[in-house]
Amino acid sequence: MPSPGASNASPAAAPTASPAASEASPAASTASPAASTAEADFTGGTATATVTLPGGALTYAGGSCEHGPADAWVAVNIGQPNGAEYFGLIAGRSPYSPTDVRTAAGGGTLKGDAVLVTYRHAGSPIVLDHDSTSVFLVVDASGGTFSGHLADGTNVSGKFAC
């Protein structure tokens, strides 16, 4: 899920993961804000994320964080969107969300159209359910937590940092 204005970065360590196979089953993808992600590569930065599932945790490191004008949105991207391992999060009023969505400025809890959390594990794309997902941002939008569930009802939570 490349963020607006994203550019390629140099390669870094790939994410590691170890959940039970049944816990990491993909949910149907319902949204993709990127028009073209074939060449995007979000590695070499300092962003980290952990996705916690009932069977274990997935850890992603070495990605990028971008902030929109006046912290309207924050985007976290780690790995290659079409690769085997990837984490992506957009929170706030991005160019991909409706104009009435709350911005990320000042932190707090965002839900609904203001958030999108997706990840890939072992090549399977997974998107947290739109209606259940919430993201809590720290005041300066440099990190936070998220929670929601997959289409099959599996609870997912995690944290991220820029």
Image: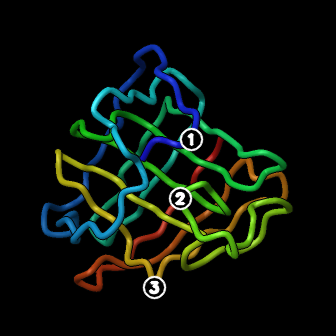
> Residue 81: x, y in percent?
32, 40
Quickly name the residue at label 2: 96
Label of residue 4 in the image = 1
Lower position in the chain sequence, tag 1 or tag 3: 1
Lower position in the chain sequence, tag 3 or tag 2: 2
Residue at horizontal 39 percent and vertical 23 percent from the top? 13
Within 10 Å of disc 2 (Cα), the crowding (few <14, some 14-19, many 20+) is some
Question: In the rendered image of this protein, does residue 124 appear above or below residue 37?
Answer: below
The quadrant of the image that shows the C terminus is: top right
User: Who is closer to the viewer here, 155 or 141?
Assistant: 141
Label of residue 131 in the image = 3
Residue at horizontal 18 percent and vertical 53 percent from the top? 124
SS for callout 3: loop
User: Who is closer to the viewer here, 110 or 159?
Assistant: 110
> Residue 78: x, y in percent?
45, 38
Circles 2, 1 touching at the beta carbon (< 8 Å):
yes
Circles 3, 2 touching at the beta carbon (< 8 Å):
no
Residue found farthest to the left: 21
SS for callout 2: loop
Question: In the rendered image of this protein, does residue 149 appear above or below residue 114?
Answer: below
SS for callout 1: loop
Tell me the quarter of the picture where residue 148 sits.
bottom left
Residue at horizontal 79 percent and vertical 63 percent from the top? 107
